[in-house]
Image: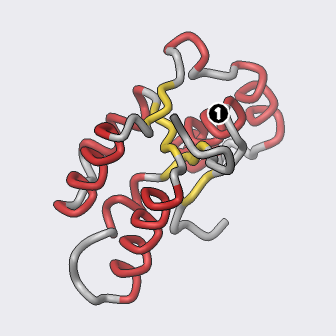
Amino acid sequence: MANQGSRRLVIDADVVHSAGETEHPVSSACRRFLETVLDAGHRVVMTDAIMIEWRNHLSRYSRRWRRQMYGRRRVYRIEKEKERDNNLRNRIDQAVHRDQKAIVDKDVHLIEAAIATDRLVTSKKLF
């Protein structure tokens, strides 16, 4: 059972990729973030698209962290039929210039997962 103050967090693959065991500032910041997620009782949101992206980018540290999250039942799985928000995608298609569409399409699954849960995305990207 999750803590009452726990949140469901969508975590971009760039965070789990960077969360290594070195003392590099980005690596240690991402690692501390993941440790805080685990210690605070938050849950990580998982969809098929996020799982595929993570599979290609997990660091050794992040693999252990993910196993701990599964072991503590802190992975919130969005059902396959609820992963895609066609209304959101249509609105994005109307609002985004076609030159920028590929950039937006690359991460729209993160926004969809956030909308379906607690509306929180963690990423290293600056928008």
Residue 74 as seen in the image, left or right of residue 70: right
Residue shown at 32% from the left, 35% from the top: 52
Residue shown at 47% from the left, 26% from the top: 77
Of residues 115 and 98, which is closer to you in this image?
A: 115
Q: Quadrant of the C terminus?
A: bottom right
Which residue is tagged 1? 112
Residue 30 as seen in the image, left or right of residue 94: left
Locate residue 37, reporting x and y percent: 49, 59
Residue 55 as seen in the image, left or right of residue 94: left
Colouring convention used in this rendered image of the protein:
secondary structure
- Looking at the image, how many numbered discs can be counted on the residues? 1
Which residue ends up furthest to the left in the rendered image?
60
Which residue ends up furthest to the top in the rendered image?
81
Locate residue 40, reporting x and y percent: 53, 59
Residue shown at 43% from the left, 79% from the top: 29
Locate residue 117, reporting x and y percent: 67, 34
The amino acid type, in three-letter code, at marker 1 is Glu
Of residues 123 and 72, which is closer to you in this image?
A: 72
Of residues 51 and 107, which is closer to you in this image?
A: 51
> Where 127 falls versus 10 (above or below)?
below
Circle 1 residues within 10 Å: few <14, some 14–19, many ≥20? many
Instruction: Tell me where residue 22 sits by quadrant.
Output: bottom left
Locate residue 125, reporting x and y percent: 55, 66
> Where 18 falls versus 37 (above or below)?
below
Q: What element does badge 1 sit on?
A: helix
Residue 67 as seen in the image, left or right of residue 101: left
> Where 85 falls versus 104 (above or below)?
above
